[in-house]
Image: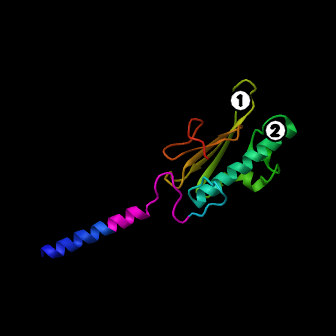
Amino acid sequence: MRRYFAGILAFGMMAAGLAMAQAPIAGQPAAGYQPKFAGDPARSEAEAQALGYMRVVLRAENTYKKRHNKYAESLEALAGTGSLTKRMARSTDRGDYTASFHPKHEGPDHDGFVLTMTPKQLDNEHRSFYAEEDGAIHADEQKAADLDSPKVK
C-alpha cells in the first residue's frame, strides 16, 4: 500500500513539474508564438495583431498631421490615410481586443489623441496597450495601460 501511494505521489509531482514547464513565464512570448520580425515585442498572435493595428493608426495619424497640420478627431476621419481602411476605422472589435480612440481637447495646443487596445481577457498573452501622438506604445498586464505603463520595446 505504501508503495502505491509513493507511486501516486511521484506521478503527481512529475505532472505538476510538466505543467509548470509548459506555462508561459511573465514577460515571455507564449511557447507557440513565432515573432513576426526581429525585436517583436508581442507575446501572442493576438498581441501581434493588436500592436499591428496600433502601428497602422499611429502612422495614419502622422500622415494626417503632416497634411492637415492637426491630428484627426476620429478613426473615421483617418480612413483612407496610409493603410487604414474604412473597415478598420469603423470596427472597434479587433478579435481578442477592443480598440478605442479619443481626441485630446486639453493641453497647450488642444491637439492630440489617445489610442488604446483593451483585451477581452487580461492575461500574460493579452496585455493592454496605450499610445498617444508621440507614437510610443505602452503595455500593462495588470490593468488598463496608460502613459505611466512601461513602453513596449
| Residue 43 appears in the rendering | yes
Within 10 angstroms of label 2, few (less than 14), some, or many (20 or more) residues?
A: some
- Residue farthest to the right, as pictured: 67
Q: Which residues are magenta?
A: 15-32
Residue 29: where, in percent of width, then height? 54, 58
**Residue 118 percent location from the top left of the image:** 58, 48
Residue 75 seen: no
- Secondary structure beneath label 1: loop
* Disc 2 and disc 1 in contact, CB within 8 angstroms: no
What is the distance, in whole Å, between disc 2 and disc 1 at their CAs? Answer: 16 Å
Residue to which mark 2 is pinned: 65
Q: Is residue 9 above or below residue 59?
A: below
Q: Position of residue 44 (x, y in %)?
A: 57, 59
Task: Provide the secondary structure element on which disc 2 rests.
Answer: helix
Amino acid of disc 2: Lys
Instruction: Please report the residue visible at 33 percent of the width from the left and 68 percent of the height from the top.
Output: 15
**For residue 120, side relative to residue 103 (left or right):** left
The residue type indicated by label 1 comes to His
How packed mark 1 is, by other alpha carbons closer than 10 Å (few <14, some 14-19, many 20 or more), is: few
Q: Quadrant of residue 33?
A: bottom right
What residue did someone put label 1 on? 105
- Quadrant (top left, top right, bottom left, bottom right) of the N terminus: bottom left
